[in-house]
Image: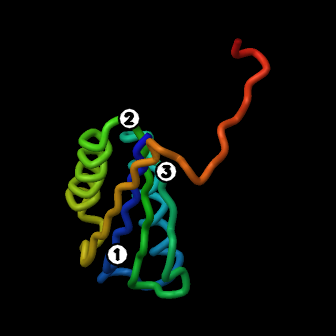
Amino acid sequence: MVVGAMTMTLHLGQGESLKAKRKVVRSIGDRVRARFNAAAAEVGGQDLWQRIELGFAVCGNETAHVDSQLDSIRRFVERLALAEVVDVRRELINLKEMTWAPAAQSDWAT
């Protein structure tokens, strides 16, 4: 399993209040969830009305697919043009080995 995480920092130039910011954050999050079936959340800057920090997570079987999904999400948010994208950071984690977690024994697998 491959897990991809991406954070995006956006600048909301026309925002006058935290209420206006929340509207933009909710719109972006809802649209990304609906279109890409990805997890989306505001992960920082909650008290700043011009700075939006969003986190997205995607998982899949192949690194190329997860990377492509994150890239598609980035382009989608940029095309929405609800706020200016100022920084994007992403990380892919391959959990194929999963040596940190013990294997779960199933009663029904024989």
The residue sitting at the top extreme is 110
Quick one: label 1 or label 3, which is nearer the N terminus? 1
Label 3 neighbourhood size at 10 Å, few (<14), some (14-19), many (20+)? Answer: some
Residues tagged 1 and 3 counted as in contact (Cβ below 8 A) = no
Residue that appears at 46% across and 50% down: 30
Residue that appears at 49% across and 60% down: 26
Q: Which residue is mark 1?
A: 9
The residue type indicated by label 3 comes to Ala
Mark carried by residue 61 = 2
Residues tagged 1 and 2 counted as in contact (Cβ below 8 A) = no
The residue type indicated by label 2 comes to Asn
Q: Label 1 to label 2, Cα distance in Å?
A: 27 Å
Residue that appears at 33% across and 79% down: 12
Task: State the residue in front, 98 or 89.
Answer: 98
- Percent x, y of residue 53: 42, 74
Residue 29 in sight in this render? yes
Q: Residue 52 sits in which quadrant?
A: bottom left
- Percent x, y of residue 58: 42, 47
- Quadrant, the C terminus: top right
In the picture, measured across the screen, residue 61 lies left or right of residue 43, that is left
Q: Is residue 104 above or below residue 44?
A: above
The residue sitting at the right extreme is 107
- Quadrant, the N terminus: top left
The residue type indicated by label 1 comes to Thr
Label 2: element kind: loop
Q: Which residue is mark 3?
A: 39
Residue 34 in sight in this render? no
Residue that appears at 46% across and 47% down: 95
In the picture, measured across the screen, residue 54 lies left or right of residue 47, that is left
Quick one: label 3 or label 2, which is nearer the N terminus? 3
Label 1: element kind: strand
